[in-house]
């Protein structure tokens, strides 16, 4: 396809047709940092830094670093692709194009002493770091802030807690969201730590500085200077490639972050079920829910996020497989590693979508209250058990369990069943008589049985707001 005639509908990847069209503002960001042209730009940046380092160490002639950097900015991705078709080697093609652009007098110093992986591995660290800094971390912070606002707004909204898909005991909706605030905040900090762990290398073909030792007395100092120009630290030791664990740590942090988003999306999807109806995605006036059922209002955005997670999560298996490289390196990660940028793309897409959804999430407090009340006669069993045990009944749990089973089978109210049981059980009657007025009121007004849910929700939000204020993460500039 000729340059300038990009047609997204003639591409293969859904990222290039489905999501390029649907969210062009995001696609432009992804292209800027994760496209093949961007990858080549980072590699050219490393090559230019190497020449500048050689100049600084007295190997390359004065002014060569600046001239090569200027030449690198002029090299086109198409030219490199054409050269690679001839050389069958991606980095040698890049080096040849850079040398031609820089001039014959500078050609000897380009790539001198380096191996391909010095360039590609260091460029990956640059690419991943900038992708985190320029869009992914800002997007995740925007989502965290949306969740904090939601948790604070709904901190006192009563909701039935659910375990194993069954009604448990009351919480507040804000407390449920606060758990996601905690989880996402922790993952963002883990991503920041993984970012700091990204390193580079300039150690040559087997990692022992063989070629560079012919050029400078202290090749490790040259490595430090070159990488410092790129804002990176050198790996303590490397082979032809970097130790894979820093990359693995980053992709684990990305994958586990995505898991938090997918879990949230799944919870909201379930709460939108017809029989629950506690939340709903906001819809536009002309939005269609079904091609045949006009009444449908589906949680399709939440389902979309979970579906994206199913695509992205298995990429972590590729990362683990790529930990193994024989001896000083093999090429079995050559194809597989090229697809890893899709995890950045998928997580970015999911974060953007969930941020928009969370800001406009419709919470049906009346439906939450109705669902909570529906099984009130049963979930009062827990506070009853705790209070009976506190006052000394040796089989308090069994008493409460039997009473709950009776109510489930026969209907009625748990407290009424308790009063009837007291007439037949002197020990139960004695213990129940010891309940304080406050404890009796709690059993009669079980909505008070929320523990510290509201307070914990507000405290969690306050704690993470304070931590976010300390992060050096630029705000996300939203468009579209």
Image (tube, rainbow, N blue to C red):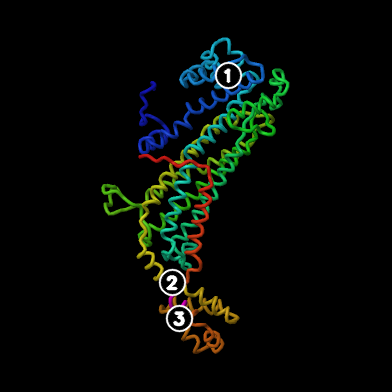
Q: Label 3, label 1: how many angstroms apart (C-alpha)?
A: 83 Å
In terms of sequence position, does the residue under pointer 3 or pointer 1 come before the other? 1
Question: Residue 376: x and y, percent?
Answer: 43, 73
> CA gap, disc 3 to disc 2?
15 Å
Q: Nearer the viewer, mark 3 or mark 2?
A: 2
> Residue at label 1?
65
- Residue lying farthest to the top in this orientation: 104
The range drawn in magenta is: 441-445
Q: Is residue 462 visible?
A: yes
**Sequence-first disc among 3 and 2:** 3
In the depicted structure, whether residue 173 falls above or below residue 123: below
Q: The C terminus lies in which quarter of the figure?
A: top left
Q: Is residue 423 above or below residue 265?
A: below
Which one is in front, 72 or 381? 72
Magenta stretch holds residue 444: yes
Residue 407 in percent (x, y) is at: 44, 77
Q: Residue sitting at 46 percent across and 62 percent down? A: 165
The answer to which of marks 2 and 1 sits earlier in the sequence is 1
Marks 3 and 2 in Cβ contact (< 8 Å): no
Label drawn at residue 430: none
Bin the neighbour count of mark 1 within 10 Å (Cα to Cα): few under 14, some 14-19, many 20 and up: many
Task: State the residue position of label 3.
Answer: 415
Q: In this rendering, which labeled residue sits more in front, label 3 or label 1?
A: 1
Q: Which residue is mark 2?
A: 447
Residue 200: image x %, image y %? 62, 31
Say whether residue 289 is visible. no
Q: CA distance from mark 2 to mark 1?
A: 71 Å
């Amino acid at each position: 396809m000729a340059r300038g005639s990009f047609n997204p509908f003639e591409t293969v990847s859904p990222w290039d047709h489905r999501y390029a069209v649907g969210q062009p503002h995001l696609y432009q960001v992804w292209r800027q940092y994760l496209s093949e042209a961007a990858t080549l730009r980072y590699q050219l940046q490393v090559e230019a830094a190497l020449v500048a380092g050689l100049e600084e160490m007295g190997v390359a002639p004065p002014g060569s670093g600046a001239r090569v950097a200027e030449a690198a900015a002029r090299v086109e991705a198409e030219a490199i692709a054409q050269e690679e078709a001839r050389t069958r080697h991606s980095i040698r093609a890049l080096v040849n194009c850079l040398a031609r652009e820089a001039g014959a007098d500078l050609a000897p110093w380009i790539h001198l002493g380096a191996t391909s992986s010095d360039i590609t591995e260091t460029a990956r660290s640059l690419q991943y770091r900038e992708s985190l800094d320029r869009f992914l971390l800002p997007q995740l912070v925007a989502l965290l802030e949306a969740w904090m606002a939601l948790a604070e707004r709904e901190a006192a909204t009563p909701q039935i807690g659910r375990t194993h898909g069954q009604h448990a005991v009351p919480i507040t909706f804000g407390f449920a969201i606060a758990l996601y605030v905690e989880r996402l905040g922790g993952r963002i900090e883990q991503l920041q730590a993984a970012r700091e762990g990204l390193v580079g290398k300039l150690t040559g073909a087997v990692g022992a500085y063989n070629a560079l030792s012919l050029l400078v007395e202290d090749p490790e100092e040259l490595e430090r200077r070159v990488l410092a120009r790129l804002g990176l630290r050198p790996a303590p030791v490397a082979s032809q490639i970097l130790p894979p664990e820093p990359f693995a740590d980053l992709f684990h942090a990305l994958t586990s972050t995505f898991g938090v988003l997918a879990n949230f999306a799944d919870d909201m999807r379930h709460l939108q079920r017809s029989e629950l109806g506690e939340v709903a995605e906001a819809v536009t006036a002309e939005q269609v829910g079904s091609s045949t059922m006009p009444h449908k209002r589906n949680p399709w955005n939440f389902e979309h996020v979970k579906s994206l997670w199913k695509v992205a999560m298995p990429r972590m298996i590729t990362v683990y497989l790529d930990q193994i490289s024989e001896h000083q390196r093999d090429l079995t990660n050559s194809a597989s590693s090229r697809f890893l940028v899709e995890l950045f793309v998928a997580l970015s897409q999911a974060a953007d979508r969930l941020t928009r959804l969370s800001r406009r999430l419709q919470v049906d407090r009346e439906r939450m209250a109705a669902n909570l009340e529906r099984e009130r006669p049963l979930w009062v069993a827990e506070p009853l058990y705790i209070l009976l045990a506190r006052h000394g009944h040796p089989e308090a749990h069994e008493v409460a369990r039997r009473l709950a089973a009776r109510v489930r089978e026969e209907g009625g109210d748990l407290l009424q069943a308790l009063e009837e049981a007291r007439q037949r059980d002197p020990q139960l009657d004695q213990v129940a008589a010891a309940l304080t007025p406050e404890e009796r009121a709690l059993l009669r007004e079980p909505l008070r049985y929320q523990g510290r849910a509201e307070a914990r929700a507000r405290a969690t939000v306050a704690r993470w707001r304070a931590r976010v204020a300390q992060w050096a993460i630029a705000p996300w500039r939203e468009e579209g």
